[in-house]
């Protein structure tokens, strides 16, 4: 019988708890709340002068289950980085019982005074809210949700935002129809498997941002034994794809079981510079 992600994580958690080891404490108490803020300089040939130093923060896979110290740490890190734009690349909420926590997070994000743009993940679809209901939830906080659509921000920053491809109807070609050239182009998606194979005729981007994988959530000697469907070959970090430079974040929250090992939650921060 093949080992599923859910079975693997449950077995690992059971073994760690039964052993009562330091590893169990790390799985359950330390790493899930130990945020790592990663900084990345993205070199763009011929980047327009007014966009040199443009900053973007990616928040993904929060899986809201109570607003706590991890989220407060994330918000402080966002303030320190002082981004021009915050992007939410899916799985921010996964069930109706978390709506109050979702509202709290969104309210805090908007208090930063930055523009916030969101896409959908598989868990928003699985929760059964419906796209319009989620859009209304975001609009209450002046957060913009885009699903297989693109938009141009002031300064010529073009964002192409797909639906989730693992549980939704992610479509890169539809998203990029009549896509303007812009001065800086970003592709926002949830499950990175949408990138391979990359659709013929789809444009390249200066940066593609994805999540979904949680970095495997558990790493054994750096190896992620199990990742969710829709991950493709991707685990976490930087990749070169036909879409261009791609970054897959480990995300903030947890799925299936509240454990992480060798795979801390991540807030990814990007600054664009001329190549």
Image (spheres, helix red, strand yellow):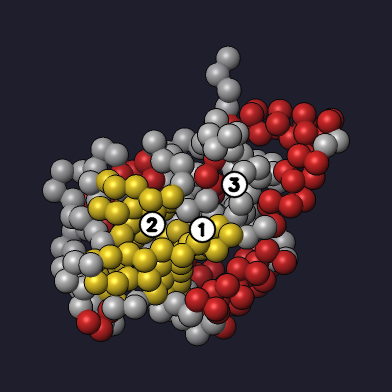
Mark 3–mark 1 distance (CA, rounded to whole Å) = 15 Å
> Mark 3 or 1, which is nearer the eye?
3
For marks 1 and 2, the one nearer the N-term is 1
Residue 221 occupies which quadrant of the picture? top right
Mark 1–mark 2 distance (CA, rounded to whole Å) = 10 Å
Look at the image and tell me in which quarter the N terminus lies.
top right
Residue at mark 2: 209
Q: Is residue 194 something one can see in this rendering?
A: yes
The location of residue 139, given as percent across then percent down, is: 49, 74
**Helix, strand or loop at mark 1:** loop
The location of residue 155, given as percent across then percent down, is: 26, 82
Q: For the image shown, how many numbered marks are present on the structure? A: 3
**Are the two marked residues, 1 and 2, in contact with CB atoms closer than 8 angstroms?**
yes
The location of residue 83, given as percent across then percent down, is: 44, 77
- Residue drawn at (24%, 43%) of the image: 198
Mark 3–mark 2 distance (CA, rounded to whole Å) = 18 Å
Residue at mark 1: 60
Residue at mark 3: 263
> Mark 3 or 2, which is nearer the eye?
3
**Number of other residues with Cα within 10 Å of mark 2, as a class: few under 14, some 14 to 19, many 20 or more:** many
Q: In this view, does 178 lie above or below 264?
A: below
The location of residue 7, given as percent across then percent down, is: 65, 28
**Helix, strand or loop at mark 3:** loop
**Helix, strand or loop at mark 2:** strand
């Amino acid at each position: 019988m093949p080992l599923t992600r859910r079975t693997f994580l449950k077995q690992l958690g059971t073994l760690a708890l039964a052993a009562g080891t330091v590893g169990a404490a790390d799985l359950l108490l330390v790493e899930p709340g130990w945020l790592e803020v990663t900084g990345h300089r993205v070199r763009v040939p011929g980047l327009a002068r007014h966009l040199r130093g443009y900053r973007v923060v990616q928040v993904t896979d929060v899986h809201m289950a109570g607003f706590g110290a991890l989220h407060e740490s994330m918000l402080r890190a966002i303030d320190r980085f002082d981004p021009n734009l915050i992007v939410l690349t899916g799985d921010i909420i996964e069930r109706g019982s978390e709506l109050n926590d979702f509202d709290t997070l969104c309210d805090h994000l908007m208090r930063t005074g930055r523009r916030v743009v969101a896409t959908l993940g598989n868990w928003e679809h699985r929760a059964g809210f419906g796209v319009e209901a989620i859009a209304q939830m975001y609009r209450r906080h002046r957060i913009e949700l885009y699903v297989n659509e693109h938009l141009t921000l002031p300064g010529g920053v073009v964002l192409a935002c797909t639906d989730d491809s693992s549980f939704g109807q992610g479509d890169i070609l539809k998203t990029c129809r009549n896509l303007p050239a812009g001065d800086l182009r970003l592709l926002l998606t949830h499950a990175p498997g949408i990138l391979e194979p990359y659709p013929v005729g789809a444009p390249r981007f200066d940066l593609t941002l994805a999540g979904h994988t949680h970095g495997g959530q558990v790493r054994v000697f750096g190896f992620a034994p199990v990742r969710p469907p829709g991950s493709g070959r991707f685990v976490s970090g930087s990749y070169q794809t036909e879409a261009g430079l791609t970054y897959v974040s480990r995300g903030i929250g947890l799925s299936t079981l509240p454990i992480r090992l060798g795979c801390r939650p991540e807030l990814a921060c990007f600054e664009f510079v001329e190549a």
